[in-house]
Image (cartoon, helix red, strand yellow):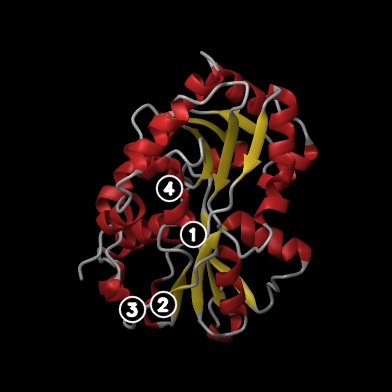
Amino acid sequence: MKAKQILMSAALGGMALSGLTSCGKKAEESTTTDSSNAVLRFSAIPDQDTSAQAELYKPVADYLSKTLNIKVEFVASPNYPASVEKFKGGDVQLAWFGGVTGVQARDAVKGAEAIIAGAEDLKFKSYFIANTSTSLTKSESFPEAIKDLKFTYGSSGSTSGCIMPSFYIMENSGKTPQEFFSQDFGFSGAHDKTAELVQNGTYQAGVLSYTVYEKGVKNGTIDPTKSTVIWETPEYADYNFTAHPVLNEQFGEDFITKLQDALANCEDEAVLKALSRSKLVKVDNSTFEGIAEVMKKVTFDK
């Protein structure tokens, strides 16, 4: 994908939120569902390459079903925009979003609420990595030298794999990514794919979620002697569960509060492992105001 074909801020929102003329109908139909037959359907952004999303998030569905005594189903999303579309259309009523997709979803659905994040998500960060053949090493200073390298982001809608890193490129260089990089950059589509492509030399450098990099090193899929961290971004808020307001109509008044409590009190190791989080904590929409402001600033000219 050519960098100049990307219109990151406005186009991301448009791409994720346009094109469903029947969305309003779907959401309206959901509100009339008999609560005894209602099903809570949730989804998640596919931030890593996986053909088994349903299997990955099954512990979450099982926990919520048991704790809240309701039917819960996981609905896979093929890409970031699709996860927002499903939420907007009422096909899912709960979603594990990144910071950017969460803002897009809440902007599209009046009354939608960010209710839960991982403890790690309140102090999230991105890792800029480079193939060791570049001879770049870790520094506290922004790695200006990446401007002449073959570079890849993750998904164009990823908070930690694109939007926030772009913001920090702009903050440190005074240039947009298109102006900063001397050659067109790429989009791997997922954090673990970025790590793979930098490690095998397809790209010389890239940026991804710090949790994915550290998990990869721990499980052996990332070799730090081939792909090394050269810079850590400042911290920001990121992933979150966002709830659709229709849930209170489907399952009764204050259901979203009960859902938030159930997740915040979760000590189920399988659930936490599925989300790659040590603990879940309560949040609200204001937690992600910083991301919303960044989305206004990170733009690409055609």
x and y percentages locating residue 84 in the rendered image: 43, 47
| CB contact under 8 Å: marks 1 and 4 | no
Mark 4 and mark 2: span between their CA atoms?
Answer: 35 Å
Of residues 46 and 130, the one nearer the viewer is 46
Toward the viewer: 173 or 15? 15
Q: Secondary structure at mark 3?
A: loop
Q: Which numbered disc, 2 or 3, marks the residue that appears first in the sequence? A: 3
Residue 191 coordinates in the image, percent (x, y): 56, 64
Distance between the alpha carbons at the discs numbered 1 and 2: 31 Å
Q: Which residue is mark 1?
A: 79
Q: Which residue is mark 2?
A: 145
Lower position in the chain sequence, tag 4 or tag 3: 3
Up-down: is 280 above or below 218?
above
For the view shown, which residue lies furthest in the top direction? 253
User: Label 3 sits on what residue type?
Assistant: Lys
Mark 1 lies on a secondary structure that is loop
Where does label 4 land, which residue? 84
Q: Please give the name of the residue rendered at 20% of the width and 71% of the height, measured from the top-left corner.
A: 302
How many other residues sit within 10 Å of disc 1, few (<14), some (14-19) or many (≥20)? some
Q: Earlier in the sequence, mark 4 or mark 2?
A: 4
Amino acid type of the residue that numbered disc 4 sits on in the rendered structure: Val
User: In the rendering, at what x and y percent does residue 176 appear?
Assistant: 27, 66
Which mark is first along the chain, 3 or 1? Answer: 3
12, above or below 33, in the image:
below
Task: Answer with mark 1 or mark 2, whichever residue precedes in sequence.
Answer: 1
The answer to whether the residues at label 1 and label 2 have Cβ atoms under 8 Å apart is no
Mark 2 element type: helix
Residue 195 occupies which quadrant of the picture?
bottom right
Which residue sits at x=60%, y=38%? 118
Task: Name the residue type under label 2.
Answer: Ala
Specify the quadrant of the image occupied by residue 116.
top right
**Residue wearing tag 3:** 2
